[in-house]
Every structure is written in structure tokens, then in C-alpha cells.
Amino acid sequence: MKKLALLPLIAILSACTGSGGFLESNTVVIEEKGAEGKAVDAIVRDESSFNWSDLTKPFSKADDTNQAGVKQQAVAELKASDTNFVLYFAYDGTDIGDKATQEIIKHANFMRDNPSVKLRLEGHADERGTREYNLALGENRALAVKEVLSLYDGMNGRIEVISFGEENPIAKTHDESSWEKNRRVEFIYE
Amino acid sequence: MKLIKGFVVFVILSLSTAQAILEVTVVKKDENAFPIIVSHFELTGKNAQDKDISNIIQANLERSGRFNVVIPDAIIDQNVDAQHWKRQNIEAVVSGSIEQQSDKIYKLSVSLFDVYSNKQLFTKTTRVHVSGFRKVAHQLSDHIYEALLGESGSFNTLLTYVTVTTDAKGNKEYRLNISDSDAMNVKSRIKLKTPILSPVWSPNRKYEHKKIAYVSFENGRSEVFIWYPYTRRKIEKLPRFDGIASAPSWHPNGKSLVLTLSKNGNKDIYSYNLEDKKLTRLTHNPSIDTEASYSPDGTRLAFTSNRSGQVQIYIKNLTTGKINRATFEGRYNAKAVFSPDGKSLAMVHRIDNDYRIAMLDIETKDLSMMTNNELDESPYFSPNGDMIIFATNRDNKNLLSVVSVEGNRSYELFSQIGEVREPNWSTYLEK
């Protein structure tokens, strides 16, 4: 029988394999109890990856898994269909040209056909200029894409906008060949 | 006698291991740097032998670029032979002694002797706890600097900066570090796999009140956190706002900070009061407004805005509410910070394709270039206003550079094992 138990000292010590010597607050210790109620084994898991329903439900959530699979497949098909998942921008620019608009329309159609998918738009900037301005600029780029998508029905609450500014470059050299790749918005479906 | 001449690279290597320790290199010194003897201290008592803090004072004075420090082989006691040093073109002599009084307590006596007037400028005698040697060395450096130059030093102060290391698999680790002004005594408790930005010291003078506001992406988007490095209360997250929360900067009273929020997508500047948790909007403009920074008296706010179609610096008068454009030269001026006297702004200025640190005289609108680099960012003044620290890039690597406002002195801080960026310099600590 599996049961949540108070942290036995041994479990805490065995969890401290790292150098810090502290048990992380989001770590859960699951204790297997033997016939005499003695702890025979301690399993340490990270709560963030721990599915609580495992304890109460003997069966996996088949429906959710299936749905996720269907979504994944749909996204894979969209990727294979010559649709760009990254749009690029001019220096200090947020303008969306005709070509980029064509790509956004493909994504809008995809979202219409797959009403359960949600989209995260991640805006990025190149390294030139200040980090905080670039954080704002990256958000404006993602918002510009969202604005076009929002012209279509059924987008409410389905699009999340995040900016990473210049913090997550794709290309690492300090010249235009890299900068043009880093001024971008990425489409990430969930 | 070891002579350290101007323009000779002076590297201070550290002893610590796993920490993201920075190496300090003096690049450029004042041509008329002040020739000074800083003798090793006389050490008495069995545990006093490793307590010679004269090396901290030597490094501090040397790094400022305003001194040529001479370290004699023999210890000089407090009876200084003025005629001898005059012949050697030495203008001042620092000597001292450390005597162990009890297990943890030491008696420290330090003198500054002026060769030309043949006078003791000061003798400071103090009892030091074993934990306080670094602090007292920085305080003494400030006393020496002020006694000889008539200006305040910036030695008894703190730095914060972000270091980034990449392992063999390409995974990054970001650390938020604090250190003394000499980049020693490093503490780096915040270690993340996601970016850390814009750390800034609160203006409080007492250690237990000192805080650092910073931006972290640990929850998948930019959020503002406050770190209490010297108290049990470790880290506090500001309430969740929609969109971006970033670019924190303290009000000089330490009770509130300004930050950039993008509610409804519109990036404006807000003041957040840490006591009553009230949010006040300070700019209302559909363009990007960000990187706000208070004047030292708290009456003005400089910020970056692209409201004109270009990226420029604006100053809001917080008494009248009026906003005026401050920069007119070039098409890109960003991240301005006020000098401690409130008369100038340091900022990032684009010239051709290069991003350099520039200084603006607010009244005359004169803009002077401080650097000759390609990718400078994040300028901040030393608390005495004498130097500007900033991040720059050389050979594809981020390092910190410090230049005097006259441009005649500079030094660098770099890491052998990673990149260093986002510097910020604290105000003075309590004496």
C-alpha cells in the first residue's frame, strides 16, 4: 500500500544527495510500508512532476492522454504543411508584412479547426540595445501577431503572450546574420 | 621594493573556488596618479599573522586609478622618515599594526603620513571583530582617499551582478551575486536555469535593511522579486501582474520602487509602494515606456520611451507632472541613470552601429561619449559619482568595465569561467 507519510529522518538524509544539504520544499517523500508497519523503502519524487491522481485513481486518464495525442498530431501536421512557426522582424520593428500575415492566417485556420488548442506567442529581440527595452520590444512583437490572430473569431482566452527580450537568442554571434534570426516571434501550441 | 607603475596590468586573483569570482584588471590610470606607500602592517599575536589587510587597501587605491601604490618589502612603522620618501618622490605613507587582544578581537591602528608637510594626517585606532576586517579595510581606504584627494571614496560599498555559465551540454546557469566593491567576498545564493535581469540595490544604509530588486524568468515570464541578502526573510515576489513586470528601480526612500508593467499590452511605468502595496501609474502612453530611474532627491524620474518614433530619454518632473524629452542626439538613447549629484545622466547611446555609454549634462544637453565599444549596456554610477560601471562585450564574452567620468581611468572585472553582466553599485553603507 502506498501512503504519504511524515518525512523520516533517513528519507531526508537519503534525499540530500546534492551539495546543498537541504531538502527542497517541493520534494515529496513516499514511504512504502512493510507488513509490520515499518518503513522498508523511501522514494523521493519531485512534486512538480508528481501526478497526485496516481494515488487515488488506479487508471490513467486515458481521455486526456488521447486528446493530447490528437493535438500533438495536429500540430505535427501543421508543421509538415509548410507553415512557419517563427516570424522574423526588422531592427526595432514590430511591423507584420504581407508574407508574415499569410503565415498568421494559416495559424488562425488551424486554431479554428482545432478549438481545443491554445497558443503561446514568445517574442524575442536581438542583443543590441538595452535588455529592458528589448523585453518590451519582444512583447510588442508577440502582441502584433496576436492582434492579427484576434481578427478571427474564437480566439478569446486562447492566446498567451510572453516576452524573453534578448535573453534566449537562437544564433549566438554578434553580427546581423545572427541578429536577424533572433528578432522573432515563436508559435508554441499547447 | 616593489613598484607598481601606471598602465601596468594589476591583477588581483582570488582564492575562492566554486564561486563566480571576478578578476580585476586595472586598464588605465591617471597620468598624475598620487605616489603613495602602503606598507604591510605589523602583526602581533598568534592568529594575527593572516590578518594583514594592507593588501585590500593597496588594491582599492590602485584600482581607483588615482594612486600609484608602492609596497615596500620591509614593514614601515609609524615613525616615518619624511626626507627619505621625499627623495623617492613619494607623497604619502600608510602604515599600521594589528594586535590580537582576545580570541576574536584585534586592535588595529593605522596612520596616514603626508611627506611634504611632514605631518601625520590621521591615526585611527579601533577594535575589530575577526569578521570585520574587510569592512574596516574598505572604511580606511575611504578615509585615506578623502584625506588626500578631498573627495569621498566608494570603497565601503557593495556590487551586485549576474553571472552566466554554460556547461558541456549547453545548459546555462544564471547567478545573482553580491560582493564588496572590490569584487571580493562574493555571495551568490540565487542560482537559476532561467535568465536574471536588472538587479538593483535598495538605498538603505544598514545591512539588515538592504534589499535587491531583480527580474527573474523562473516562472516562465518576467517577474520582479526582492532579495533580502542579510536577513532570514530571503526572497519576496511582487504580486502577479498581467504581462511584463520588469525594470525595477528604488525610490531614494527605499519604501517604494518603480517598475514597468504591461497591463493590456501597454508598457507604462508604475510606482509600487512596498508598505501599503499600492500601485500608482506614472506614465500613460501607448508607446513603450520603461527603464525608469529616480533622481537622487526623488523629484524627477528619467525613463526610456519610443513615443517619438525613436528610442529616447524623457524626464518626468514628479512635482508638476510634466514630461520633457532629455536626449536629442542620435536615434537611440536608453537606460538612463542619474549621477549622485542629480546633474547628469549616464545612458546607452547608439552611434552608427555601436552601442556606447554616454553622459548627458541635463542642463546644457551636452552629450559626451564615455566608451569606444560596440555593445555596451547597463551603466550605473559609483556612489561618489566618480566612475561609471557597465557591461560590455569583447571576443564574444560579457564583462564589466568601470570608467571614470573624466575618461582618464578604467578597470575591468571579468570571469574566467563565464559571462558577467547587469552590474549595479550600492549607495554608501553605514559607517
Image: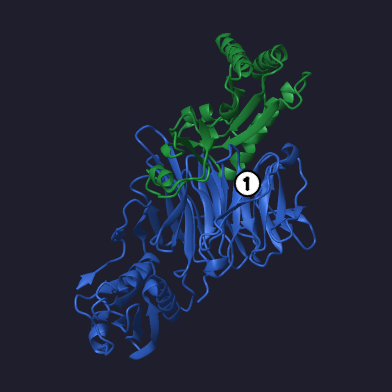
Q: Is residue B234 left or right of residue A149?
A: left
Q: Quadrant of residue B48?
A: bottom left
Residue A132 lies left or right of residue A46; in this view the side is: right
Tell me if residue B426 comes above or below residue A92 in the rendering. Answer: below
- Residue in the image at 60% along x and 30% along y: A122
Closest to the observer, B163 or A68: A68
Instruction: Give percent across and percent down for residue B350.
Output: 55, 44
Query: Which color has been applied to chain A in this rendered view?
Result: green
Q: Is residue B332 visible?
A: no
Residue B156, percent across and down? 46, 70
B273 over B54 or under it: above or below: above
Name the residue: 36% across, 80% down: B105
Residue at position x 39%, y 55% from top? B412
- Chain B shown in which color? blue
Image coords of residue A93 (percent x, y): 63, 32
Residue of label 1? B246
| Residue B87 figure quarter | bottom left
SS at badge 1 = strand
Instruction: State how the image is colored.
Output: by chain
